[in-house]
Image (cartoon, rainbow, N blue to C red):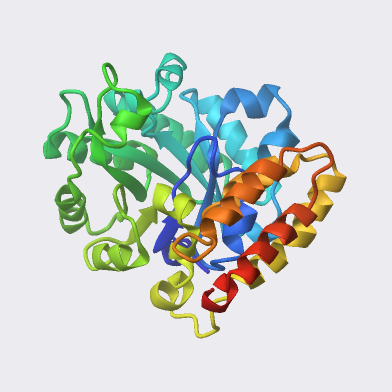
Amino acid sequence: MTPDQFHRLSVAPMMDWTDRHCRFFLRQITRRALLYTEMVTTGAILHGDRERFLAYDESEHPLALQLGGSDPAALAECARIAEAFGYDEVNLNVGCPSDRVRTGRFGACLMAEPALVGSSVAAMRAATALPVTVKCRIGIDERDGYEDLLAFVDEVAAIGGCGSFAVHARKAWLQGLSPKQNREVPPLRHAEVHRLKRERPDLEIVINGGILSVEAALAHLESVDGAMIGRAAYQDPWCLAEADRRVFGETAPAPGRAEVVARLLPYLEAECARGTPLKSMTRHILGLFNGLPGARAWRRHLSEAAHRPGAGPEVVEQALEQLDRRGALLAA
């Protein structure tokens, strides 16, 4: 699958959420949607436990590594490392508005420095054969007009040769709003991302922000190249079940929810044997049965039992049995 194909639908990178356990789980639901890591800083890769930050299961492909940083040389080295690890894409975070990120001079604050972003992309592209993409906001602070967005994209494309932008259709206030508020308070402006694609048809434009279903993603795909689902895919992961068929034209039937759990059990067993706490993995699957009878019992059993010392895959099997007794698996 080429990059322009897998960008049609992706699951957004989300700090503290899209770790490798989450991604393995989501891959059991959709084979085709592009998955992203959490943002990983250049410092963590160059000076930290590289295996911890970059390890993944082969089934996660197609998989993009999202980097945070602003030093072109460090970003270039991390792009080389990403290629050596077998990632399918490297994405530069120019959209995260948190104070911690801003203090480190990466994330959304870089939208005020398009020349630096362009230089960073150029250095990364020179260092790897992988696609290098940028994820940004529609604007920051008072630089939030459409012309500001267009100027940013044009400069990054001209200097860095970047041909693919994922645009979160909300501006970011760098002071005064928390990251959570920045996901909710600034109004969505999808029409401006659509306009960007119309006026820059040679660029690949992916839209992000407020897209809650595959149905909504399909509507956006009439105007842009790709759509990105964020928290909706985490809180209600089954919203991705029809993605392969409806977005990518797959003919194979989607697995049932019970089948997804069955596929997950050997992974849980192997990870527990390696010392991974069960709760670190089951937190990602709490929403799998949302909307079905027994969903609350599923969530409650996992939440109460997964943290116990020695907890293993049997906890998930027990939760599934509770659902079965309620007849939920017949509807799954």
**Which residue is depicted at the point 38% across and 38% down?**
160
Is residue 230 among what the camera can see?
no
**Which residue is depicted at the point 38% across and 54% down?**
228
Corner quadrant of residue 171? top left
Q: Quadrant of the C terminus?
A: bottom right
In the rendered view, does 89 fall on the left or right side of 242?
A: right
In the rendered view, does 3 fall on the left or right side of 60?
A: left
Looking at the picture, tell me which residue is in the foreground, 54 or 293: 293
In the rendered view, does 3 fall on the left or right side of 178?
A: right
Give the x, y percent position of residue 238. Answer: 48, 64
Corner quadrant of residue 92? top left
In the rendered view, does 115 fall on the left or right side of 142?
A: right
Compared with 309, 7 (above or below) is: below
Looking at the picture, tell me which residue is in the foreground, 44 or 329: 329
**Which residue is depicted at the point 80% across and 49% down?**
312
Of all residues, the one furthest to the top in this rendering is 103
What is the count of numbered marks? 0
Of all residues, the one furthest to the front in this rendering is 325
Give the x, y percent position of residue 132. Answer: 47, 46
Is residue 199 among what the camera can see?
yes
Looking at the picture, tell me which residue is in the foreground, 300 or 266: 300
